[in-house]
Amino acid sequence: MNSPHELTQLLDALRALRDGCEPRAALATLTRTRGSTFRRPGTHMLVLHDGRVVCELSGGCPQRDIVARALEVIADGAPRRVTYNSESGLDVLMEMGCGGELEILIEPLAPAGAIAFADSLAQCLAARIDAQLATLFAVDGQVIAPQRMVWSAQQVLFDGIGDAAIGAVLATACAAHRPRGATTQQLASPRGTLDVLIESVQPPHALVVIGSSAAARALLPLSTALGWQTTLVDHDPVRLQSPELPPGLRTLCTTPEQLQQALPLDAHSSVVVMTHNLERDIAWLAALRDAPVAYVGSLGSRERVSRMRHASELNGLRLHAPAGLDIGSETPEEIALAVAAEIMAVINARSGGPLRDNDGAIHG
């Protein structure tokens, strides 16, 4: 799937197409995979008529071939499904040593209606609402011009299906889809067997950094590079005006008691407390005890962390302290990398260990 950051870029580009700021284009979507592949189902790449792309799929041989076929789709205006495997004669993945198979849907985006779903998805991202995007692209095995539905909170936000019976089937499938990931399903309907890609769409992750330590300042540009919506919080307005801060950074001057009123937090948020004062750290952490966030972390030595864990104010708080994965970090930049890596592992439900086991086998 595309990351929320990539999806934001993609939606911006799609809406620019609709507004006439860009030329004709085609959308390439990874619908099925098998074995080892470079991306997973639900990943999209926009190809413009001059060969420029938005949200690269791989950057290697498969992408070059996909771009070439997308240009053909732009020229003839007909959607197509391309399979890359050892039997199709398009085994570029096999040649690269990946050994996987994949299916790509490529659709022209000439009609304005083809990208009308983008507004609904963009509104969900802006409101930080989880949604499901269903793309119907084949009926009884025959590729059709893709039709889409955006579903969220038990209701249809966008209906580009135009058929009540099929729409009901897609809405039911969206309601049953898991919160994360994407999958192509074959669904029975009164109109035949439907091939439907269902994707979970989640807002960009938000990172709140509390404190103005060297490690905090080092974490800010890394967080921004990862596409996280980054906010620096401090109770001292002078520190928030430091020329060392990245340009355009969102800052907030507040106190622990006012934090949750001043800054809405949700399940797609993480908070890292990085001040120089233990009592102040505990006050900030205590203010987060009932916050619905994915991750709360704090830096500190063994003694400092022990005192945090024994602080009655923090009872019930699931605290990552000291924050970060054990990669031997010492400098502020290394500490920032360790912290960002642990946050990513937590939000992706991963252990944060190596990609291989002791025998060299690669985890899925």
Image (cartoon, grey):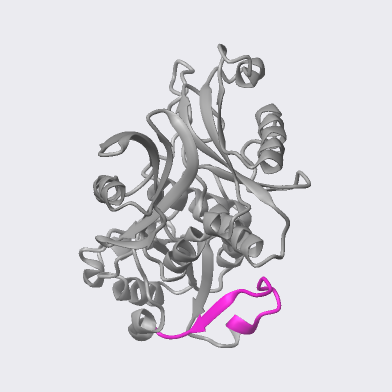
> In the figure, residue 92 lies in which quadrant?
top right
Residue 299, given in percent of the width and then of the height, sits at 45, 61
Q: Residue 143: x, y in percent? A: 48, 34
Span colored in magenta: 240-255
**What residue occupies the far right of the structure in this picture?**
50
Principal SS element in the magenta part?
A: loop
81 up-or-down from 269: above or below: above
Residue 10 visible to the viewer: yes
Q: Residue at x 56, y 51 (%)?
A: 337
Magenta run includes residue 231: no
State the image quarter where residue 69 is shown: top right
Q: Quadrant of the C terminus?
A: top left
Q: How many marks?
A: 0
Left/right of residue 74 with respect to residue 2 in the rendered view: right
Front in this rendered view, residue 123 or 155: 155
Q: What is the quadrant of residue 90 in the picture? A: top right
16 left or right of 274 in image = right
Give the residue at x 43% y 22%.
357
Task: Name the residue nearer the viewer: 134 or 283.
Answer: 134
- In the displayed orientation, state which residue is furthest to the bottom: 237
In the displayed structure image, the side of residue 349 where residue 55 appears, left or right? right
At which x and y percent is residue 170? 30, 47
The image shows residue 247 at horizontal and vertical percentages of 68, 74
Specify whether residue 324 is in view. Answer: no
Q: Residue at x 55, y 79 (%)?
A: 251
Foreground pick, 57 / 281: 57
Q: Is residue 250 magenta?
A: yes
Closest to the observer, 194 or 300: 194
| 157 is higher (above) or lower (below) than 94 | below
